[in-house]
Amino acid sequence: MSSQEMLKFGEKLRTLRVQRQMTLKGLAQTLGMTSHSYISELESGKKKPTAEFVLGVSRLFNVTTDQLLKDELDLNIDTPE
């Protein structure tokens, strides 16, 4: 995963989180993490996501892993009613 791809993943992750009105801390807790610093680093493109993390985000936000990881695919986001 290139640095440009990591940045795109981070942007998508941030978009999903903000649209669901979740804080970094709230997302971390929902995913069973003890700290939100890893998510912050992902969103800023400083770290690469693990496969486990991508799967967790995919399930939580009801998007495919391809939508999260492939730059050419946009997110089709269903807003909660």
Image: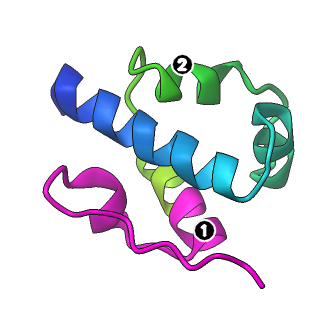
Along the viewing direction, whichever of 4 and 49 lies nearer the viewer: 4
Q: Is residue 61 magenta?
A: yes
Q: Secondary structure at mark 1?
A: helix
Residue 9 x %, y %: 36, 41
Along the viewing direction, whichever of 63 and 80 lies nearer the viewer: 80
Q: Which mark is residue 39?
A: none
Q: Which residues are magenta?
A: 56-81
Quarter occupied by residue 49: top left
Residue at the extreme top: 46
As shown in the figure, which amino acid type bears the numbered disc 2? Glu
Residue assigned mark 1: 61
Q: Is residue 37 left or right of residue 28?
A: left
Earlier in the chain: of badge 2 and badge 1, it is 2
Q: Is residue 74 above or below residue 22?
A: below
Which residue lies at the image location 41% right of the left edge and 14% below the top edge?
Answer: 46
Which residue lies at the image location 21% right of the left edge and 63% below the top edge?
Answer: 73
